[in-house]
Image (spheres, coloured by chain):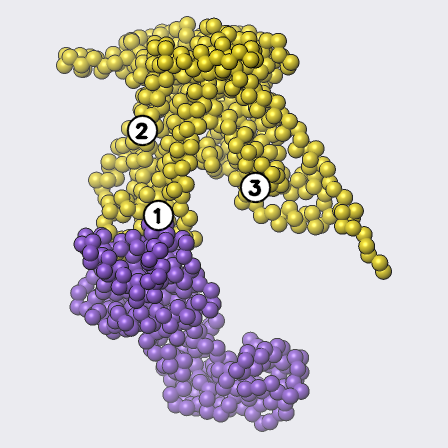
Chain colours: A yellow, B purple
Amino acid sequence: MKSNTKLGEVVKKDITPYLVFAIPLAFMAIFLIYPMIITLARAFMPAGNKLLFGQFSLSGFTKFRESSMYRKALTNSFIVSLSVTAFTILIGVPMGYFVARVKMPGKNLMLSLGILPIIMPSFVGAFTWVILLGRQGVVRHFLNIILGPLGIEVPTIYGMFGMILCMTLTYYPFVFQLAYGAFASANSLLEEAGMLMGASRWYIFRTITFPLILPSLGAGALLVFVRAIGNFGIPAIIGGDKYVLPTLIYFRVNGFWDLNGAASIAVINVLITALVLYIQKRVINRHEYETISATHSEIKQHEGVAIRIIAIVYCVLVLVISLLPQITIIIMSFFEKWIGLLPEGFTLKHYARIPIYSKKELFNTFYLSILATVLAAILGSLIAYITERKKPKGSALLDLAIMAPFILPGTVVSVSLLSAFSGASVIALGGTYTIIVISYMIRRTPYVYRSVAASLSQLNPSLEEASTIAGANWFYTFRRVSVPLIMPAIIGGSILTLTTLLQELSTTILLYSPKTRTVPIQIYGAVADGKLGEASALSVVLLVVVFVIVYAMNRKQGQSIASSFKMG
Amino acid sequence: MSLSLTYQHVNKIFGEQSKNPVHALKDVSFTIEPGELFCLLGPSGCGKTTLLRSTAGLESITSGQILYGDRDITAIPPFRRNIGMVFQSFALYPHMNIFENVAYGLRVRKTPEAIVKEKVTEVMELVGLTEELKRNPSPTGLSGGQQQRVAIARALVYDPDILLLDEPLANLDAKLRRYMRAEIRRIQKATGITTIFVTHDQEEAMAIGDRLAVLRMGVVEQIGTSNDLYTCPDSAFVSNFIGKMNFFNGTLASPVSATLDNTPITITVKEEKARFAAPPAVGSAVLIGARPEQMEVLTSPAADTIEGVVQIIQHLGQVVRYEVIIDPSISDTPLEIDMPCMIEGVFEQDQVFVRLKEGLSSLFDVEERN
């Protein structure tokens, strides 16, 4: 028999994957890359909101030299983010070590409670600190009674002190959880070997344990820095007259509708983040170690009475202080006012008014978050699948593109979407639900993407190859083999996306219209108007919803939420 | 020169207060001589690693004493015991280069820089890594065998009193393993440090150790030289763990002979080959043991042969191994019989006749064996 059939004729190219992949790629190009380019272009245009191609101007940047407000905002951003990073390390590393290495009761409870500050909207944390440490704050009031006679006056929460305190307590869980993971999973043999060679515990910690957790610590520090420099809610509520870059952007857009000016600030903001990311990568790459060992034995825990007492007191103290906001808003939501030591005037009216005054906001919040989550899950899984499995040329670029929004502050994403799609642009989306859904997708797709990509890289490709060999086409394999296997990762990423979107403030605040107002916007407004009871009740509702979702996920998947926040 | 190492009634119970305590070491008592290379051998879970880790002080023992020379070291913490240990996974520090890895124990002891350099160079020469030390890479850049040498150098550099090796060859490939075990013996003899070598590979243990201890379920079954254990095993378990032993069910006919069940054949053994814990009464059930080379395969029957069917024939080079199935009431596992060369005209599934060569077999108490 003659067999001169060319292989190419036998194997008909399956074009389904290319069609399926084209859609997410087109989406990324139109709604991420294009707005970024426009933003970059606008940054070099004269102030205003007009797209003036050909009129090159550096006025947006020279302001950082000329205007003292700009200069201060830049300095403040640096001071706040760097101090927050330093303080979260100072608080989180010892706590991680204690929980991982000291024998104590309730470790799981501590780990769970240690997550709460990150799942609560940070601006809610901020306004509860107003209740506690504001001009008439409870704690301040109390401390002043004690310290007043000594001539010490406790500073109010407004300003740098408040921003740093508030962000530190919000973000320390990142460092705590990552440090805990690193200390708990370290290879105990490396430490035992040191002990046999005659090294004391402290010497081993200094020369072996600590150097080996540095990469994890670097990742945690970066996460904190990126979030601190992009945080809008906290400085907006308690920054007082101290502007930082995100509030400065808001001020340019909301006060002057100066999109070009805002774009310049956004570029500076992103540059700083990118620079820090670069430095961190450089440092980490130099310190990333292959572990030679595979066998792990259980790590010895400290059992000394003194260290156990110190560890328990320390952890409980940190947890109580960082959970004060949660406790405070629950109390506040049932009272008329809280000025002085005790809250006054028990009432349920804050809750009673929610169904009447917040119906639209509640609907919007859930509608926008769920829609964006579903779309982000599909988009993120598909792109993860492309980059992991098909390894197309330039997949590193795709990876970079999809991860970019992860480090972009929410206000920057809004500015870029407004730059491209507001007013009389080709695709006009100003004030619509669509622009908010798109902004949510752009910002949160990385969560699903990361989670799915990690899961896929652990999945043996031969599982899929076996299906292909058995005669299944690409789509059948994807549907029946790949998707079921990566489902836990998709769900994990989606839950994280949903919970963060339900409390989204920094993007929404520049994009919402009366029609598309969400609950976080309403809370922000209530705080601005001084209606703390109303804001508390709404926050409690939000908090309960988020907590229930997270709790349900943890029960079902038993995975730590902090691990989902990790970035590569 | 190192001193001796003595275990006195050592017991280790994991989870003593829990519902299912595990008795990992049961009344272990023996002495390792100064400068001896001693092997702890046993199947996984027999307690050999626990005994090693207890010696190092990484586990605390439940009762008993461990003596170095005359000194009781039971309560001394691991970092004061002056012990060198090579881990199965090597446990090299990935964030240090190989010089710093080896120097670690000296740095801990605050040794002056000049002496550190001198000692590291000296020990690296001993393990044969002089060239690598010049490049001084990170241990991750070395091959398995080189990492192994670094791990040994690191354990030797501060002149430990005792050297512990925990399955140090398990992560190496077969060829390198055979080479490294000769190297380890050379290095150990050059330093004269009392050494314990843990392994589950009997061939490795027999090749490397001056003496061996076979452990089973936390109990020391037998201690002796490779030759003692191979030629005069104390129990059916040891005999089948150190080399292969075929077992036959039999009945004791006299203190030194037994009749194979369901046959008229009587096997007589040499006096020292009747390995009973206490001599059983004539007529009790016993096990008759014969190693593969102590049997032969014949093509025609005789008065003292047993009928069987060849299952598998394997040519192993110096011998040909025949796997033969016989009446399960005599022996329920296939026999392994080594012949010096192929037997003409015998193929798999053929009927053959097997015989226990005269005067070579052993007798054992009946026990569960594996």
On residue A456, which mark appears?
3
Q: Give SS at disc 2.
A: helix
Q: Furthest residue to the right?
A: A1
On residue B203, which mark appears?
none
Residue A396, picture quadrant: top right
Closer to the camera: disc 3 or disc 2? 2
Residue A280, picture quadrant: top left
Going by the numbered disc 3, the residue's amino acid type is Leu
Give the residue number, with chain letter if any, for mark 2. Answer: A86
Q: Are marks 2 and 1 in contact (CB under 8 Å)?
A: no
How would you rate the neighbour count of disc 2 (Cα within 10 Å): few for under 14, some for 14-19, many for 20 or more?
Answer: some
Q: Chain of mark 1?
A: B
Give the residue number, with chain letter if any, for mark 1. Answer: B95
- Using the rendered image, report if marks 2 and 1 lie on a common chain: no
Q: Chain of mark 2?
A: A
Going by the numbered disc 1, the residue's amino acid type is His
Residue visible at 34% across and 54% down? B136
Residue visible at 21% across and 61% down? B73
In the rendered image, the quadrant that contains the N terminus of chain A is bottom right
Q: Is residue A103 above or below residue A329?
A: below
- Using the rendered image, report if marks 3 and 2 lie on a common chain: yes
